[in-house]
Amino acid sequence: MNYIDLTEKLVKKCLRIGADAAEVYLETTRNLSVQVLKAEIETIEEASSQGVGFRVFVDNKMGFSHCNDFTDRALEDTISRAVAFAKLSSPDENNVLTDDMGITKIDELYDPGIVSVPMDNKIKMALELESLALGVEGITKSSGAGYGEGESEIFIGNSNGIMKSYKSSGCYLGVYVVAEKGNQKNTGGETCSRVFFSDLMSIEEIAERATKKALELLDPVMIETQKAAIIFDPAVARSLLGGVITAINGERVLQGASFLKDYLNKQFASPLLTLIDDGTRIKSLGSSPFDGEGVPTKRNVLVENGVLKSFIYNTKAAARAGVVSTGNASRSGFTALPGIGVHNVSLATGNHSQSEIIAGTAKGLFLKEVTGYGIDAVSGNFSGGASGLWIVNGEIIHPVKGVTIAGRAFEILNGIDMMGNDIDLNRRFAAPAFRVAEMQIGGK
Amino acid sequence: MSMEKHYVRDIPRRKFIELSMKGGLLIAATPALMTQLISCRNGARSAPGLDMDKEILAGIIAKALEKGGDFADVYLENRISRQIVMEESKFKSGLYGISQGAGVRVVSGNKTGYAYTDEITEEKLIRAAEVASYVATNGSRSEPVNISEATRPSYITVEQPLGEIADEKRIEVIARADQAAKDYDQRIKMTMVDYYDEVRSRVIVNSEGIYLRDELPLLFFIVQAMSDNGKTRHMARERLSNHSGFEMFENVTPETIAENAAREAVVMLAAGDAPAGIMDVVMQNGWGGVLVHEAVGHPLEADNIAKGIGAFTGKMSQKVATDCFTMVDDGTLPNFRGTVNFDDEGTPAQRNVLIENGVLKGFMTDILSARQLSMERTGNGRRESFRYIPIPRMTNTFIETGKDNPEDILASTKKGIYVQSLSGGSVNPITGVFNFTCREAYLIENGKKTKPVKGATLIGSCMDVISNIDAVGNDLAFGPGICGKGQAAEVTAGQPTVRIRGINVGGTKA
């Protein structure tokens, strides 16, 4: 089936059925996953599917419906449902669709080779990964290893004449293991996700990372309730900065539901903090030539040297704020309305190696795991459960588990006083290690 | 891929929107036909897409087991959903969806093969059966499968079927909630109201010969109220959810929900810094049961036990908690959000006592883990939709009511934290280490609830917490939530007022 033709035809059909303006979002996907446990297959799942979502406007009111039956009758009835449902909504002059014809050229978002790797090789890879991880001294059990892949093609058309499409792929390989010692039990896992199959990390490297996480927190010592420095491992940077991303969501800002709502072009964090969202990075799972409603993606500097430079917007929120979309309409599939989200977030690197940061810390926690919801984007409070390695006089002396850490967002973000120089840009949320001068730790 | 984190929360808005738009198919239906489709009175047959002939279904099961295998099932599903969102007192959008599809599963030893299709045709299901049978290698199994209709009791009653409710009535309850929240206090600056309803029809057929068909209506109503006094803000949330008809809003009015949210939002404006460190915690009755849902419930799901890695592995019939602690999972509570009639594998729902007076009595199983552990099936094999395989899940999970007077529990606690409501939390089911976040909490000073404190995280390990519960009230209550374990499930969590000695609190004040 020619989906470009179908998408264009459906836009016209929406207008004929009664919409003043309409957007058609069509998606086809294929997924495969394999889980292995104790050297045998645990589950194999496979499916391909397709679907289409209709966003229609009637007198500036919005309605939405979706379906995956591509017969004429079904599509027409689905559109009628969206048109009828639009009439329930309140009119909003900001209910507009993009007319930006641009497409950002990004190479290598699709690997045609994934599908041609034989199934048995993929299963073998997961089995070998599990076996390798289980072979590490101190690792006692497997919680399973897995391989998965998916590919999708997205088509967006709207009544402003836009018709865009792109194809993307992704695959992952990961393992979770358990380390036991006496009555102690600790888990560790690592998953590597890439656009290209050939870019997956070696099974040796994945196994090494997973097992290290399970082993490094054995024999913890409880620490006193106190204030101390906190060094964020790159893997847990998101626990702190995720709340900042939510707080710069342009719609939440307009609603007053953000602790950063009054800080545009103002210093709110340490000069060491520069935060970038880049939807154009090649070979990246967060990249796309256009966002969830067809606006070309860009590289946006969100925070520069601690100054808030930009909120993030989709077309509707941008219209309300009187600015242009930043290309941050997110979409979790054909069943969903466009929201607001980021593509690939990264922190600018600083001057210090990880070992220099540790060596320069008189007393602190090298944070390896954080639980909880991170910074509350409305109030700016942060509280979480924490595990990591305890540092005294620049040296790691023992693991710590079962403590809490807490603080207020402004104090934490202004307290960043050392920024690492090492970053893995394959993460969708990439950061070097960095240090916050002081946070409250809850212990014994 | 995340294999180790299980969470539950009181339905954050984003997740709610995601869940309410689960993928699928809007089938051909005129508005008139739609009324019939959504009707669920007296078990009237709806969702004609599920009307597949039993002989054809038996043929698909036979195909699935052609290469061998111990068990196979076919699951057909049709879900009709409506969602209406109000933000800032405006009806932001109306969403409508029908999601339809089917999955075929083959179990061979410990292996599971699964494939699904969103077209319910014999051809597509035969192809799914072939894909799913990839795991079967133990030779052919040719005995034909006889499929016959099975019966199960129902715990869900409907007085006002969702299909007979005009959209204007839906609009009305949303507008009433919005108004009530704004009228509560001038410091309420914004409200968000999410209304969602669905009817899920399902057909379950398996190689043991059962054929089951039913439909579950579900209503879900969330009010968020944001307060702002110029210095600080608090976003409060209150929810109501049942498997029932629209009469839910007569039993608990939209105003009640909205006022509860607004009350929390205003009270928490005065919140001070929470203390940090290990202290006693009194948890008010209701949704606080999320603590045991996370800390004890997930580790008692039998999949990790069958793998030999769960926190309670090898502890059956042993004393694991204090004498006053009894914990139950019950899928039969009338109209509750977690109630299932029968699970998504066809096993009848039942009351399962998990821990009785401190002694471990049972795990929650699905068909696969029950077989692996040689245990009974408990009716806990659930799935988010046809896109997922069934796995052991909780339903309505709670600490059984105790003997203590709630006022006495507070009065006898000298110092600590009084937790009135929680957002939610997560657990590592292998180690049993959990965390959860307070939404409304107070200091306890000399046996009295005093100042409100900001949202702090509470952490601990499951074995410690159930050994340290030393008072259980006589005031059991429940709250609705979404539980995530790679896939979502609707649940309730419940508890009477309880006291836990020594939990680590993540506050900002030493």
Image: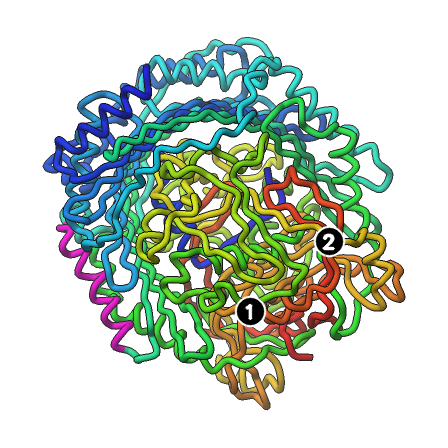
Vertical arrangement, residue A48 with respect to residue B379, above or below:
above
**Residue on which disc 1 sits:** A381
Is residue B380 within the magenta segment?
A: no
Res A81 → quadrant? top left
Give coordinates of residue A104: x percent, y percent: 46, 32
Q: Is residue A307 left or right of residue A92?
A: right
The residue pinned by badge 2 equals A350
Q: In which quadrant is the C terminus of chain A drawn?
A: bottom right
Mark 2 belongs to chain: A
Three-letter code, disc 2:
Gly
Position of B1 relative to A49 (above/below): below
Question: What subunit carries mark 1?
Answer: A
Residue B482 placement, left or right of B112: left
Residue A202 coordinates in the image, percent (x, y): 74, 28
Left or right of A148 in this view: A176 = right
Displayed quadrant of residue B163: top left
Q: CA distance from mark 1 to mark 2?
A: 26 Å
Q: Judge by depth and name the residue closer to the eye, A244 or A64.
A: A244
User: What span is colored magenta in the figure?
Assistant: B165-183
Labelled pair 1, 2 in contact (Cβ < 8 Å): no
- Residue A408 place in picture, x, y as percent: 59, 71
x and y percentages locating residue B36 in the rendered image: 15, 38
**The furthest residue to the bottom:** B446
Disc nearer the start of the sequence (1/2): 2
Q: Is residue B17 left or right of residue B485?
A: left
